[in-house]
């Protein structure tokens, strides 16, 4: 797991790293939510491809917001709904 001890200006993750883990795969185009249009890069083989540059920017925004909450003594609830995320969620929740 990558350490997050860095400045708010340093990216938490890059679009290239997101691409490497397949984060660009979206839902089938027929199952889409029109509110997601700004975040869709393209449509290929009847599936949407997610804009990873915007995804990386939003991850950075979320990181800064969460960091500010924790620095002020606030609490953050981490929820994972997929069984595969169970271990990661548990580890990150106590970190």
Image (cartoon, rainbow, N blue to C red):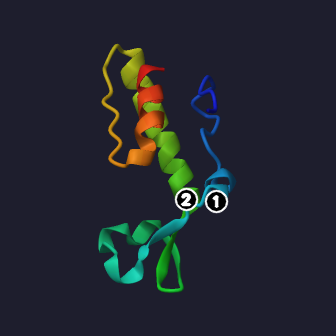
Tag 2 secondary structure: loop
Q: Element at badge 1?
A: helix
Q: Quadrant of residue 77?
A: top left
- Left or right relative to 61: residue 22: right
- Picture layout, residue 94 above or below residue 37: above
The N terminus: image quadrant: top right
Name the spot of residue 20 as percent of width and height, x first. 67, 57
- In the image, is residue 51 above or below residue 18? below
The front one of 44 and 81 is: 81
Q: Is residue 29 above or below residue 10?
A: below
Residue 62 location in percent, x, y?
44, 39
- Classify residue 18 as left or right of residue 26: right
Q: Is residue 65 left or right of residue 8?
A: left
Q: Residues within 10 Å of mark 2 (few under 14, many from 20)?
A: some
Pointer 1 residue: 19
What is the x, y in percent for residue 92? Answer: 47, 28
Residue 4 in which image quadrant: top right
Question: Crowding at label 1, few (<14), some or many (≥20) Cα neighbours within 10 Å?
Answer: some
Marks 1 and 2 close (CB-CB < 8 Å): yes
Q: Residue at x 55, y 59 (%)?
A: 23
The residue located at (51%, 55%) in the rendering is 55
Q: Any mark on residue 47, and which?
A: none
Image location (x, y in percent) of residue 73:
34, 13
Q: Which residue is mark 2?
A: 23
**Total residue callouts:** 2
> Residue at coordinates 64% horizontally, 32% vertically from top-left?
2
Q: Residue at the spot x=46%, y=35% of the render?
A: 87
Q: Residue furthest front?
A: 83
Compare residues 32 and 71 and report the one nearer the observer.
32
**Marks 1 and 2, Cα distance to the nearest angstrom?**
6 Å
């Amino acid at each position: 797991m990558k350490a997050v001890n860095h400045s708010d200006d340093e990216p938490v993750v890059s679009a290239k790293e997101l691409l490497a883990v397949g984060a660009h795969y979206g839902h089938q185009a027929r199952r889409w939510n029109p509110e997601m249009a700004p975040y869709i890069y393209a449509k290929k083989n009847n599936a949407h491809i997610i804009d990873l540059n915007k995804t990386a920017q939003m991850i950075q925004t979320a990181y800064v917001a969460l960091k500010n909450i924790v620095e002020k003594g606030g609490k953050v609830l981490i929820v994972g709904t997929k069984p595969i995320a169970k271990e990661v969620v548990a580890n990150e929740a106590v970190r």
